[in-house]
Image (cartoon, grey):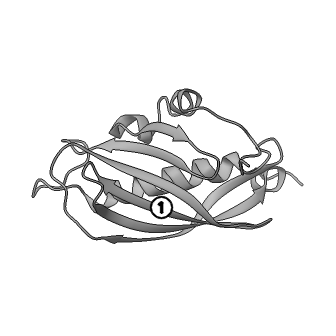
Amino acid sequence: MPIWLTPATPDALNALSTRTMSQHIGIEFLEVGDDYLKARMPVDERTVQPAGILHGGANVTLAETLGSVAGTLCIDPRQKMVVGLEINANHVRPTRSGFVIGVARPLHIGVTTHIWDIRISNEQDQPVCIARLTLAVLNRERASGGG
């Protein structure tokens, strides 16, 4: 049974990414499973460090994008919003080319917080980065300065 309160498709999520950092660095949503969200990111001039390997910050961007979008799909976005509270990332393997693929799965979906596990692998399915994202779930009215 799907965990999503707001159903979505990869095409819809990619359309929402227009004119954002995700689009700028080439993040593309691939799959919305019953309890996971999958996206990929190119390893190219937009995402590498001067040494020619994938920048750790690009890994973190992919992880936070996946977790934040997944968290948003688990709430009513008319009433609530999620924001990143903390992210931890371990970079375990350098990558020089191709794509990395990230998969976000929930560890905890609560009323006020979510915790997401994001695994990023290379095209050979070897781990590149393991991240954990904690999201705060806020009332949209309060977060926007009203009431």
Q: Is residue 130 left or right of residue 78?
A: left
Task: Determine which residue is flagged by label 1.
Answer: 118
Relative depth, front residue between 44 and 11? 11
* Residue type highlighted by circle 1: Ile
Residue 81 in the image, given as x and y percentages of width and height: 72, 51
Taking 102 as reference, is 19 above or below it?
above
Taking 23 as reference, is 109 above or below it?
below
Taking 127 as reference, is 26 above or below it?
above
Give residue 6's quadrant in the image: top right
Residue in the image at 54% along x and 27% along y:
11
Residue in the image at 75% along x and 55% along y:
143
Residue 54 in the image, given as x and y percentages of width and height: 22, 55
Question: How many numbered marks appear?
Answer: 1
Residue 24 in the image, given as x and y percentages of width and height: 36, 36
Relative depth, front residue between 10 and 135? 10
Element assignment for label 1: strand
Q: Is residue 120 left or right of residue 81?
A: left
